[in-house]
Amino acid sequence: MNDKTPSRGTAWLICALVAAALYGNYYVYDSIGPVADALQSQRGFTDTQVGLLNAIYNLPNVLLILVGGVLVDRFGAARVTVWTSAICLAGALLTAFSPDFFGMAAGRLLFGIGAETFGIATLAVLAQYFVGGNVAFAMGLTLSIGRLGSFSSDMSPTWFAHAYAAGWQPPLLIAAAAAFASFVAAVLYWWIDRRVADKGAAEKQSQPFVLRDLLHFGKAYWYLLALCVLWYSVILAFRSTFSIKYFQHVHGLDLASAGAMNSYVFLAAVFATPAFGWLCDRVGRYAPFLAFGALLLPIAIATMALTSASLWISTALIGISFSLVPAVMWPLTSKLVAPARFGTAIGLMWVAQNAGIGGANVVAGWLNDRAGASAQNPAGYESMMLFFGLASVAGAVFALILWLTAGRKAQEQATHQGA
């Protein structure tokens, strides 16, 4: 760093504030899963409606992520971080205080409008303040802290048992408090950022989405995009929406135990994601690790749905997959496309990913309702698990194709140079 760039201490302080903001954001996103059963029993929601509460988060971002990237480029990461965290807070409050499903859905929609652009802004923040080095480690560390928010949300039935005993609303009020803390952290970051003289270099790195750039992406990139959509659709639609209910109704766990079991996926990722990223960088290979991580997901789904094996086994497999795939996917993307098109490539992947997650939530909820899935009819969840299993197998197939066609070290380097 030179005298016109932030000090190392300032950079790490900003990283801490962004991580704190991300923690609250992740907590709110995962707050529906722990109250899903209560929403059904106390408010009469169907599984389709529960699925929509998370699906509606993703659906607007099929288009709005592109707009969000332009906003970050136009107004800067600091302003957009504050704006979007305020929108997320408003969405969390509306969700918690709404008297009916439509109000809650509107709250989740508002939260989703802010949250994904918030995610893009946080990447831009870290790229700005760690332009001189350590950007990968800073991003991995920040993502890990964010995942602690998901872990905390899953553990909340244990930590805040009195709130859950009082009904569906108090847990969502806790989520709104997490959103408020996220907003405060974002405002503190913005306040510090205003006192940093030179921000231009990092902001110029932002890449607007250019449609014609899609013509320059090779087959390997499209294989990776397909994997991204299928893998995230399964792991987030299942883990963030239906897994806790599934553990309760099919495997006989109580709410606290089901939330704790679900939380260990993210707890493992907090420590393992940076470690896997470091390992891939050290050996210089990405596609084989990606294929291995993708393959673990259908194995975990099959173990959970078709055997009587302990849930610890499938949870461990999902945890490894959830740690390994994100640690490899984004660095591998940078190998498959030229640096000047990296922003476009990531933007398109996020657009497709949101469409997939939203669609998977809706389909899974519809399948459960159609089969009458419940604690009294645990077999009704079989069609949902078959859907998740087939989608995860398809994702693993694309990962294997990517490894075989462009996954050798020399091929990755050649693709990067020619992109």
Image: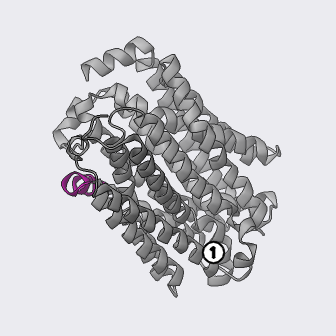
Give residue 258's quadrant in the image: bottom right
Q: Which residue matches tag 1?
A: 171
> Looking at the picture, how far across and down is residue 280, in whole percent?
52, 24
Can residue 82 be seen here? Answer: yes
- Magenta span: 65-76
Q: At x 26% / y 42%, what residue is drawn?
A: 202
Q: At x 67% / y 54%, what residue is drawn?
A: 263
Magenta span includes 276: no
Q: At x 44% / y 50%, what residue is drawn?
A: 13
Can residue 374 be seen here? Answer: no
Quadrant for the C terminus, please: top left
**Along the line of sight, which residue is nearer the eye, 137 or 91?**
137
Give residue 206's quadrant in the image: top left
**Along the line of sight, which residue is nearer the eye, 246 or 164?**
164
Colour approach in the figure = one colour
Quadrant for the N terminus, please: top left
As drawn, the residue found furthest toward the bottom would be: 99
Disc 1 on helix, strand or loop? helix
> Given the image, on which type of amino acid does mark 1 rest?
Pro
**Along the line of sight, which residue is nearer the eye, 59 or 176?**
176
Give residue 204's quadrant in the image: top left
**Along the line of sight, which residue is nearer the eye, 274 or 190?**
190
